[in-house]
Image (cartoon, rainbow, N blue to C red):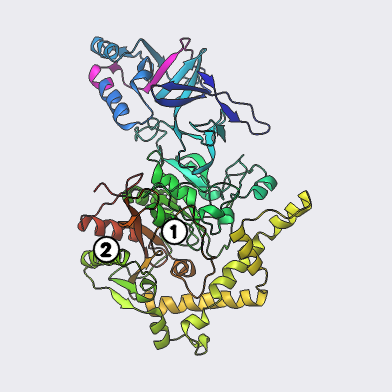
């Protein structure tokens, strides 16, 4: 065993976990505050027996079989010593057949201990005993795709601290994940919570108490201090039982960067197709973690103008942009608060729905009071025309057909430009949609993003006597933004309001029908990580990824297929993910999951995606 390095937080006692291996698997044992008197050095399994009086072979056999089948941390080796903790005044009886069974499983030592102040902090699961002290065992996984910036474990007080354990290469880190036994596998246990056992990765633009935020910019990291408080939206997850295993990379300042433009930290590696495709951004690390690692349940990102939906598309994951205002921005690095929302990625639709319910579902009840039926599907010809890839359009249209069959409706194939011409808002003064909204997205978003980081630029200059380094695409955007006037920004914000009201009245017909808009994310074609982006992000009019932010509406991104191409890397036919989004009225987040699940199941489509190269098992 070796001592593993945990970076201490200033003012906090240094922890000394132990790292060890069983076969090819690596583990880390975290010091536990329990004072249970166990003198032997061995692998240990703790089992809580509640008020059980007799341990039989049938009972303990089912417990161990459940642990081995369902927990990816537990192995037979941890049965070397087994500790039964029981409550009540009577002694615990281990029957002869139970003792014979335990011996057959390799158990060398059996300990029974009544519940007491010295062991009440223990939970069922695997431990390591060393020098008379118990350590809780977590499993280590290598971040082979470079998704993480910080990997985190709890210290003795339960606060998260940095874990610095290297992988098989000098630049890779190990990520520790806890056993599922104390939480997910014991739903009647007092420790059980809605997200118990869930391993969560969090984009590095949310505060984690004691950890310095980087926003994937070294200058920002130099200036930042350890956070005094965890972001409110992330604290909800912790309260619900989730484990935060680390923070993930992003495009710097949550902007738009392709891999060669990621200067301060290398972009993560998208596992799909040939392994050399762009992970998109800005929530690139979260999208990659979700697509690459089956030991991550959900990855948290953020979305302003596509930062969550684009990585969902390119990394082949479900991605959810919530109704605006349901999740707190406290402790979240804002870019354009009017558009900014925390978002999340997942591989299984049912798990995503459950997660959403636990994270912010309780906030949905009083938001929308309108009709819930009938459904109307809106197929926007303006946005679909942008996609030139015929195979991608075929995949989208096939999914639309399945939606129509499931909902029993025909989609309305309309042009927003033509609808504007037919029923224009009086405030437009006769201007056509594209002319009226030409600079509205840019002058609203870019202006506020630039000025929101003004204090950072000033404080960095004051402290270091120089301007901070900013990557080329962000530098270009901020230079352009510096010339947008306050008057232009105010005019742009007003036009966003007018467009939103017009869209809700004319297109969504809010209060009259329940409309769902089908949105393509962007054209899918090879986008290799060794190729420089050909253009800067400069929104004109109302781009498709700006629609739900302007409306404050929920948008669910759904992987629906794969598009073949000949890879210049492998020389083989590879497959790029294809996704499509559904937008509903604010407050209809849960309904989007119900519609997506019902459609996919009725059509015989997968409701989950795989990790790794391909999305589906066929």
Task: Identify the residue at horizontal 62%, vertical 66% (top origin).
Answer: 448
The question of residue 45 being in magenta is answered with yes
Taking the spot 39% from the left edge, 80% from the top edge, the residue there is 506
Magenta-drawn stretch contains 525: no
320 displayed left or right of 257: left
Q: As rendered, which of 51 and 242 lies closer to the eye?
A: 242
When the figure is inspected, residue 529 is found, relative to residue 390, above or below; the finding is: above
Residue 295 in sight = yes
Q: Height in image: 34 above or below 382?
A: above
Q: Which residue is mark 1?
A: 310
Q: CA distance from mark 1 to mark 2?
A: 19 Å
Residue at the outermost bottom position: 430
Q: Which residues are magenta?
A: 37-60
Identify the element where label 2 is drawn: helix
Rendering coords of residue 60 (x, y %): 28, 20
Residue 551, percent across and down?
46, 70
Q: Is residue 159 left or right of residue 512?
A: right
Determine the image quadrant of residue 511.
Answer: bottom left
Left or right of residue 121, residue 205 in this image: right
Callout 2: 10 Å neighbours few (<14), some, many (20+)?
A: some
Q: Give the residue drawn at x 53%, y 51%.
A: 250
**Sequence-first disc among 1 and 2:** 1
- In screen coordinates, is 71 left or right of 21? left
Q: Which residue is tagged 2?
A: 399
């Amino acid at each position: 065993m070796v001592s593993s390095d945990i970076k201490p937080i200033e003012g906090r006692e240094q922890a000394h976990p132990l790292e060890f291996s069983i076969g090819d698997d690596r583990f880390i044992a975290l010091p536990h505050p329990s004072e249970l008197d166990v003198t032997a050095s061995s692998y240990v399994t703790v089992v809580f027996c509640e008020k059980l009086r007799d341990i039989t072979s049938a009972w303990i056999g089912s417990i161990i079989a459940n642990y081995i089948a369902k927990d990816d941390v537990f192995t037979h080796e941890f049965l070397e010593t087994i500790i039964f903790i029981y409550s009540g005044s009577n002694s615990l009886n281990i029957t002869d057949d139970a003792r014979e069974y335990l011996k057959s499983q390799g158990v060398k030592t059996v300990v029974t201990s009544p519940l007491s102040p010295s062991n009440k902090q223990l939970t069922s699961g695997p431990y390591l005993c060393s020098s008379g002290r118990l350590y809780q065992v977590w499993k280590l996984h290598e971040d082979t795709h470079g998704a993480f910036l910080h990997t985190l474990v709890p210290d003795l007080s339960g606060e998260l601290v940095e874990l610095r354990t290297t992988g098989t290469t000098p630049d890779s880190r190990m990520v520790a994940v806890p056993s599922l036994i104390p939480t997910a596998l014991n739903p009647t246990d007092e420790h059980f919570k809605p997200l118990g056992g869930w391993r969560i990765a969090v984009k590095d633009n949310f505060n984690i108490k004691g950890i310095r935020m980087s926003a994937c910019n070294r200058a920002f990291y130099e200036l930042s201090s350890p956070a005094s408080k965890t972001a409110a939206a992330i604290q909800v997850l912790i309260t619900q039982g989730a484990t935060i295993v680390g923070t993930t990379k992003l495009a710097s300042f949550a902007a738009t960067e392709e891999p060669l433009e990621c200067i301060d930290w290398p972009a993560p590696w998208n596992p799909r197709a040939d392994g050399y495709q762009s992970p998109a951004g800005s929530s690139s690390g979260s999208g990659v973690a979700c697509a690459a690692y089956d030991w991550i349940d959900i990855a948290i990102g953020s979305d302003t103008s596509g930062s969550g939906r684009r990585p969902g598309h390119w990394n082949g994951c479900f991605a959810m942009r919530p109704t605006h205002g349901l999740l707190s921005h406290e402790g979240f690095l804002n870019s354009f608060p009017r558009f900014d929302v925390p978002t999340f990625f997942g591989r299984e639709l049912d798990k995503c729905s459950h997660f959403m319910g636990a994270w912010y579902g309780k906030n949905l009840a009083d938001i929308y009071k309108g009709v819930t039926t009938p459904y109307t599907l809106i197929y926007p010809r303006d946005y679909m025309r942008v996609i030139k890839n015929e195979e991608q359009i075929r995949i989208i249209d096939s999914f639309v057909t399945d939606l129509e069959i499931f909902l029993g409706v025909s989609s309305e194939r309309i042009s927003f430009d033509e609808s504007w011409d037919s029923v224009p808002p009086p405030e437009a003064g006769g201007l056509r949609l594209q002319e009226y909204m030409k600079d509205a997205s840019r002058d609203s978003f870019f202006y506020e993003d630039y000025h929101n980081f003004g204090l950072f630029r000033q404080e960095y200059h004051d402290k270091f006597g120089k301007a901070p380094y900013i990557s080329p695409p962000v530098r270009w955007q901020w230079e352009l933004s510096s010339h947008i006037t306050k008057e232009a920004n105010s005019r742009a914000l007003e036009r966003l309001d007018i467009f939103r009201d017009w869209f809700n009245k004319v297109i969504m017909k809010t209060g009259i029908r329940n409309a769902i808009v089908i949105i393509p994310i962007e054209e899918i074609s090879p986008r290799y990580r060794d190729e420089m982006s050909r253009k800067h992000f400069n929104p004109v009019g109302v781009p498709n990824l700006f629609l739900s932010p302007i409306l404050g509406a929920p948008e669910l991104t759904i992987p629906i297929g794969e598009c073949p191409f000949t890879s210049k890397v492998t020389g083989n036919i590879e497959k790029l993910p294809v996704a499509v989004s559904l937008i509903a009225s604010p407050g209809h987040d849960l309904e989007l999951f119900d519609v997506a699940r019902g459609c996919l199941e009725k059509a015989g489509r997968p409701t989950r995606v795989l990790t790794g190269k391909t999305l589906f098992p066929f």
